[in-house]
């Protein structure tokens, strides 16, 4: 079994910054893509940023230039540095990972989410 645990959410004023972390643990052989998604109240979950093992990054247009995704492959950890936060960034942020387990299975996992609230 594999677990993803997010941390770093909280309340911040507009214009401020937060850094999210997500650590994967368990029966992991390798992780290909890791990323962040978010779900605002009353809206569907949407991708925010993803990063391949080879460091190819993709960002949602709404966060380009403000958010930076990075990862530490040795620690199976992905980060999301969020700058110039806006009230519309308020959401539950979920970590996601494509994992090859030690038993050879390829599966997609989600964390439980961390709440980011941006006040105006």
Image: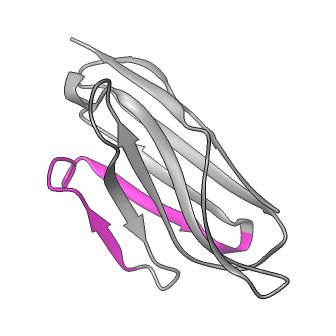
Magenta highlight range? 56-74
Is 60 one of the magenta-colored residues? yes
Task: Choose between 1 and 71: the one closer to the eye.
Answer: 1
Residue at 35% x, 44% y is 45
Residue 39 percent across, percent down from the top left:
36, 37
Q: Is residue 41 above or below residue 95?
A: above
Query: Within the magenta stretch, is there residue 10?
Result: no
Image location of residue 24, percent across then percent down: 71, 59
Q: Which residue is drawn at 34% across and 72% down?
A: 57
Q: Nearer the viewer, residue 113 or 118?
A: 113
What percent of the width, then of the height, locates residue 66? 24, 47
Residue in front for this viewpoint, 91 or 105: 105
- In the visual, does 39 lie left or right of 21? left
85 on left or right of 109? left
Q: Quadrant of the C terminus?
A: top left
Q: Is residue 115 above or below residue 45?
A: above
- The quadrant of the picture occupied by the N terminus is bottom right
Question: Seen in the image, is 15 located left or right of residue 79?
Answer: left
Image location of residue 20, percent across then percent down:
52, 42
Say which residue appears at 73% left-offset and 83% top-offset.
105
Rendering colour mode: one colour
């Amino acid at each position: 079994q594999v677990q993803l645990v997010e941390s770093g959410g909280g309340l911040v004023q507009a214009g401020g910054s937060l850094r999210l972390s997500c650590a994967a643990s368990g029966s992991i052989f390798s992780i290909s893509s890791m990323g962040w998604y978010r779900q605002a109240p009353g809206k569907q979950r949407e991708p925010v940023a993803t990063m391949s093992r080879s460091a190819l990054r993709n960002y949602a247009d709404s966060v380009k230039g403000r958010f930076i995704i990075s990862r530490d492959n040795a620690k199976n950890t992905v980060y999301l540095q969020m700058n110039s936060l806006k009230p519309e960034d308020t959401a539950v942020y979920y970590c996601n990972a494509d994992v090859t387990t030690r038993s050879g299975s390829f599966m997609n996992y989600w964390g439980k989410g961390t709440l980011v609230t941006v006040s105006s």
